[in-house]
Amino acid sequence: MLGMLAASLGGGMETASAAAAAAPQEISITAIDGLRIGNAQDTEAKTGVTALVFPRGAQAGVDISGGGPASRETPVLSPTTAATPVNAIVLAGGSAYGLEAGSGAMRYLEEQGIGYDTGFALVPIVCQSDIYDLSYGSASVRPDGAMGYAACRDAMERNRPQQGSVGAGTGATVGKICGMERSMKSGMGIYAVQLGNLKLAAVVCVNALGDVYDYRNGQKIAGLLQADRKGFADTRQELYKIASPVDMFQRNNTTIGAIITNGDFNKAELTKIASMTRNAYARCINPVGTLADGDTIYAASCGQVKADLNMAGTLAA
């Protein structure tokens, strides 16, 4: 099976023995043609925007597993809707207030002649998801149209992938079940690989309720701290102490991200890839997908490489 998959990726030219030895190789996310990435942030207020821009458009799907998502235009990604290309996926802070950034993204894209031509106006299709970062930094400063505009401009003019406390990750924290005083700073992460001709990247902003683990060895690397902040506590144990229904900590958490590939997939297939990618959240975050989280994963295709859906979804996870 592996030989068949790798042969399909390489245009049928690879031998079974060569395919059996194949392994994903790390690449830069900028190696994915048709994607540009940029950021804008307010480092004092601790909030920001990350823009994934598809100048030529991209098909996309989405998986929403959290109970409190802040999102924009996700219904257009349903497999039952028209196959209209998406022009940008925006990840931002500010909770629902931050959805204003999408309007600025639309304005910039329209100025660049990017969008769906209705015959009367150019309408950029911009999907967006936000984390809740109002409890870190300033609660009164949120991503707005100007910040969304700036992130898209950064993507188109510079295309500089950045990680850490940048863009949507500027105000991201984890392990907040006992309050911000026992949480840890987190941020934005990017990783991209190539297998045969298939290229695939993950862009994820981690703002989870739960603790974060290294999936390779099970070691906890971030999350809830003890009261003296000198060691880790266990979010699950704190959750088990809850004896009656509560307001789930004001829904102050969310892990949002996107899978970008040059694989040739339609919306239904990309929706499946996004749902398969949810396995990564389960491997690395515990607990995850609670009503206090708005966990969301996009999957977008901006290429024409033929690839197996199950392999791509497994690689994405």
Image (cartoon, rainbow, N blue to C red):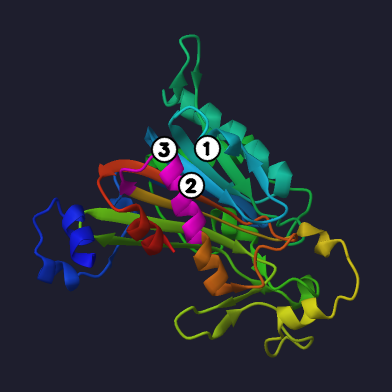
Q: Earlier in the sequence, mark 1 or mark 2?
A: 1
- Image quadrant holding the C terminus, namely bottom left
Q: CA distance from mark 1 to mark 2?
A: 8 Å
Q: Picture quarter containing residue 21?
A: bottom left
Residue 110: x and y in percent read: 48, 24
Residue 81: x and y in percent read: 52, 30
Q: In the figure, is residue 137 to the left or right of 27?
A: right
Q: CA distance from mark 1 to mark 3?
A: 8 Å
Residue situated in front as seen by the camera: 89 or 62: 62
Amino acid carrying label 3: it is Gln
Main SS, magenta region, reads: helix
Amino acid carrying label 2: it is Thr
Q: CA distance from mark 3 to mark 2?
A: 10 Å
Q: Indicate which disc residue 207 carries.
A: none
Q: Is residue 66 above or below residue 119?
A: below
- Residue under label 1: 77
| Magenta highlight range | 262-277
- Residue under label 2: 271
> Given contact means CB atoms under 8 Å apart, are the residues at marks 3 and 2 in contact?
no
